[in-house]
Image (cartoon, rainbow, N blue to C red):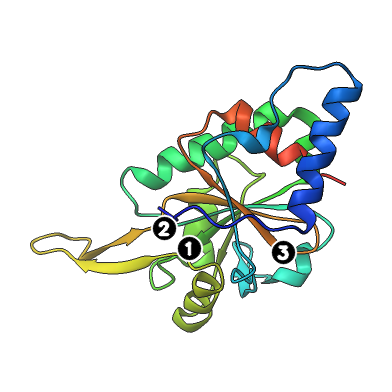
């Protein structure tokens, strides 16, 4: 899990101030979604650049998605438990957004490009066609992961048909509509709370 990051005084700080101000004007006691303990602000060291292909085989760089905030998870299709649970939360969060979900781009970015071909990812994500799978070569997938400082490591399995598994970070990531990484979200957050955070980034 990522350690807490020092607060920035840029776009996120301005957004948080706006949320507080609007709540005050409206006489609303609703808590600022950014105050949820599962929300982690990301420093400027997170770049968010990638040059991959989607699960239909089309080029998918970070520039392709500019204009929409990105809601991303890094995992792999043969993950036995952690990734399916996270994808379930991702799908439920999109459901909680209602029509607003159309203004967010959900991505499942593989940390196991050797096995996760476009065809594998497309089949894996067939349960929710809103989520787009991204893969690439081992080199481009590693570059995408390092750009977001996502930990992942191959672990060999003895006496298993799978041969190996992947240990990896279990967090959602939010990039704004310009492709700037702004937040990490713990996957234990309630879908409704995640939806409230994501709505803040819709233009």
Choose the circle earlier in sequence order: 1 or 3.
1
SS state under label 1: strand
Q: Residue at x 65, y 73 (%)?
A: 49
The reply to whether callout 2 and callout 1 are in contact (CB within 8 Å) is yes
The reply to whether callout 3 and callout 2 are in contact (CB within 8 Å) is no
> What percent of the width, then of the height, locates residue 152?
37, 66
Q: Residue at x 67, y 27 (%)?
A: 96
- Quick one: 120 or 198, which is closer to the camera? 198
Choose the circle earlier in sequence order: 3 or 2.
2
Q: Quadrant of residue 64?
A: bottom right
Per the image, the residue denoted by label 2 is 76
Between the C-alphas of marks 2 and 1, the distance is 5 Å
Between the C-alphas of marks 1 and 3, the distance is 20 Å
Residue farthest toward the left in the current orientation of the protein? 159
The correct choice, above or below, for 23 with respect to 40 in the image is above
Choose the circle earlier in sequence order: 2 or 1.
2
Per the image, the residue denoted by label 3 is 180
> What percent of the width, then of the height, locates residue 166?
31, 62
Per the image, the residue denoted by label 1 is 110
């Amino acid at each position: 899990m990522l350690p807490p990051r020092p607060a920035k005084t840029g776009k996120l700080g301005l957004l948080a101030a706006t949320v507080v101000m609007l709540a005050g004007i409206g006489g609303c006691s609703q808590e600022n979604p950014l105050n949820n303990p599962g929300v982690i602000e990301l420093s400027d060291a997170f770049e968010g650049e990638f040059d991959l292909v989607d699960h239909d085989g089309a080029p998918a760089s970070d520039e392709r998605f500019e204009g929409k905030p990105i809601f991303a998870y890094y995992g792999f299709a043969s993950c036995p438990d952690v990734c399916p649970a996270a994808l379930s939360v991702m799908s439920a969060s999109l459901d909680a957004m209602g029509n607003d979900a159309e203004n967010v781009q959900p991505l499942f970015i593989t940390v196991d490009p050797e096995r996760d071909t476009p065809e594998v990812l497309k089949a894996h994500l067939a349960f929710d066609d809103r989520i787009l799978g991204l893969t690439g070569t081992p080199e481009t997938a590693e570059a995408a992961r390092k750009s977001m400082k996502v930990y992942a490591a191959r672990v060999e399995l003895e006496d298993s048909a799978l041969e190996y598994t992947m240990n990896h970070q279990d967090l959602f990531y939010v990039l704004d509509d310009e492709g700037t990484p702004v937040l990490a979200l713990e996957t234990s957050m309630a879908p409704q709370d995640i939806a409230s955070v994501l709505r803040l980034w819709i233009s």
